[in-house]
Image: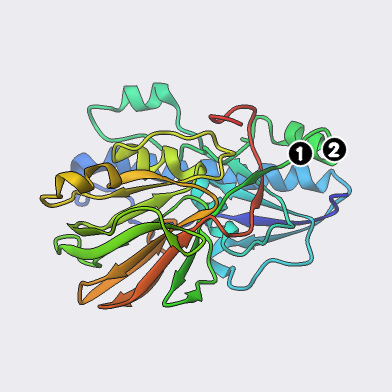
Amino acid sequence: MLRRVLLLLKPFNVYPPRPKPSGLLHFGPNSKVLSYLDDRCKVHEEAIKFCQNVLRRKSLDWEPVMRNYLTQPIRDVDLVITVGGDGTLLKASHFLDETIPILGVNSDPTRIEEVERFSNEFDATRSTGYLCAATVENFEQVLDEMLESRKEPSKLSRISISLNGSKLSAFALNDILVAHPCPATVSRFSFRIKSNDQNISNLVNCRSSGFRVSTAAGSTAAMLSAGGFPMPILSRDLQYMVREPILPRQIDAPLLHGLVKPNQSIEATWYSKEGTIYIDGSHVFCSMQHGDTIEISSNAPMLKVYLSQNPLTQ
């Protein structure tokens, strides 16, 4: 039974205050986009108020928390609701185990008509909300379905990362990027696919801009933009890709992009002076140095996520 709820909120005052334009002070061609960003903050703030009002009408014990203040594992709740976009849900996922489900509310979805209307002035695209099952338009309906046990969460795979044999505490719901911290610097590493400590691929030696590994949920994000393919969201496979390989051997070409099955892992050795493992974007990362070994697999706790009817589904 869902009774105790943590309401995790993306901040709505993310931009510094600006003086209002006057006869002597104006923002020139940027004034329209700045005004548009201010409007987006107001829409998000209104979405927060709307969700809070819905929760007040339910027999729930709930507490709002800004995502910036989340530093400890989430415990002693039955449900986490995030209000923001996919980034807010990803932030929450790093503090959740496999027992507590999460519902994402996309507070300000992209409106195609706005993107087209402003396309010659600025980019009006906002969060895709791929992992968010609700917006303000259907939040109460989705919540009622959950409370009445008419909607169940899906179990999504995550990525486990070990550095020099020690497992990192954060699991990636979308993807990881392993690269030199300077994007203009070549990353040097080798990797192979293993299963039960047995090598099932040749060793691939790489000079590139790093490599990316995604879950099925993350396969429609940066992986797809880089030329990968979308995967059924409930797949346990991982997809990997070496980024911008420099003069790879012909024999290695088929191994530069592929799948890692649930009983397999990627084992890599880092040969650049320094490197970074980025987990679900740039906010969670771990530094590496020459000679470090990395093991990547789907051997991580699943995450219970309430999904919309068909995100690429199941």
Q: Nearer the viewer, residue 251 or 35?
A: 251
Residue of label 1:
152
Tell me which amino acid carries mark 1: Glu
Q: Considering the numbered disc 2 on the image, is that residue within a helix, a strand or a loop?
A: loop
Q: Is residue 9 visible?
A: yes
- The correct choice, above or below, for 267 with respect to 227 in the image is below
Q: Residue at x 15, y 64 (%)?
A: 185
The answer to which image quadrant residue 58 occupies is: top right
Say the numbered circle drawn on residue 188: none
Q: Is residue 308 left or right of residue 167?
A: right
Q: Residues within 10 Å of mark 2 (few under 14, many from 20)?
A: few
In the image, residue 208 lies at what x, y percent?
18, 56
Whether residues under marks 2 and 1 lie with C-beta atoms below 8 angstroms apart, the answer is yes
- Image quarter of the C terminus: top right
The answer to which image quadrant residue 29 occupies is: top left
Task: Give the CA distance from mark 2 to mark 1.
Answer: 7 Å
Q: Is residue 293 left or right of residue 139?
A: left
Q: Residue at x 76, y 42 (%)?
A: 54
Tell me which amino acid carries mark 2: Ser
Q: Nearer the viewer, residue 43 or 288?
A: 288
Q: Considering the numbered disc 1 on the image, is that residue within a helix, a strand or a loop?
A: loop
Q: How is the image coloured?
A: rainbow
In the image, residue 123 lies at what x, y percent?
30, 35
Q: Is residue 36 left or right of residue 291?
A: right
